[in-house]
Amino acid sequence: SAEGWIESEMMDSARAVLFARVRDADTHGRLRFYTPITSGGADIYVHAKILVIDDTFLRVGSSNVNKRSMGLDTECDLAIEANRDDAHAQRARAGIAGVRDGLIAEHLGMTLDDWTSILAAADGRLAAALDVGVGTYAKTLVPFTPRRLSLAEQDFARAQIDDASVLESMARDFRRGLAWPGSRQIAAATAIALTLGGAAWLATRRRADARARIAQEGAGDDAPPTL
């Protein structure tokens, strides 16, 4: 999860909206969201970014799937693709599958042989194999469900305030402005004002949500819609 209140509101809220949209598109019921826990039930924070598509594509790197990371931040990723026309394609596919299966086995707290046996019994269907393997041992993966968002948080997520194109434009203006006398103090004051303004806006929306819930509960209506 994100560190800090502002970052949490920006990233966690946007993630919840994205998850809801992806789940709505899962017409075949194959989508699974999991998070790892220790044998004692404590959450394991995994900061690594790894993407594996079947046994044909592997990506390891620092980038996140969001506009800021893809359009503004400096990132470094390594990608390996098993091209079927390549003489080494079979070896590459085996290597990609090995990374995928090794990571899944580690998170499920079982040996690689145990996991590959479960996968083979499921005819290679990953979702079906996970449904069997999850919870076999104390150290395992558990389903992840984003917390329900208030109306204010939904607005915050959809406002796209961290749009990379906007940030890039702001960055150019700040760099140009820093060349002026006294502009560093102005830039610092502007940054503080933007932060306080965003916090005040969100607090106002939260109070409005609370008043709306109280009014609806008093009238016997349902709670406001949330994700």
Image (cartoon, rainbow, N blue to C red):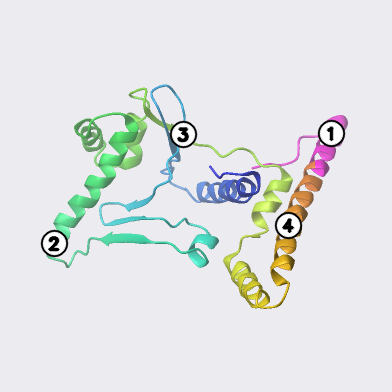
Say what amino acid the circle numbered 1 marks: Ile
Which of 82 and 20 lies nearest the eye of the viewer? 82
Say what amino acid the circle numbered 3 marks: Pro
For residue 77, above or below residue 202: below
Check disc 3: other Cα within 10 Å, few if <14, some if 14-19, many if 20+.
few
Residue 180: quarter of image: bottom right
Return the disc, 4 or 3, that comes first in the chain's sequence: 3
Residue 197: quarter of image: bottom right
Return the disc, 1 or 2, that comes first in the chain's sequence: 2
Which of 188 and 33 lies nearest the eye of the viewer? 188
Contact between labelled residues 2 and 4, with CB atoms less than 8 Å apart = no
Return the disc, 4 or 2, that comes first in the chain's sequence: 2
Q: Position of residue 6 (x, y in %)?
A: 65, 48
Residue lying at the far left in this picture: please name it: 87
Give how far apart the Cα atoms at labels 4 and 1 are: 33 Å
Return the disc, 4 or 1, that comes first in the chain's sequence: 4
Q: Which residue is mark 1?
A: 214
Side of 155 relative to 50 (left or right): right
For image coordinates 55% across by 51% down, the residue present is: 18
Give how far apart the Cα atoms at labels 1 and 3 are: 32 Å
Q: Which residue is mark 3?
A: 143
Q: Which residue is mark 4?
A: 192
For residue 172, above or below residue 142: below
Give how far apart the Cα atoms at labels 1 and 2 are: 64 Å
Q: Is residue 50 magenta?
A: no
Say what amino acid the circle numbered 4 marks: Ile
Give how far apart the Cα atoms at labels 4 and 2 are: 55 Å
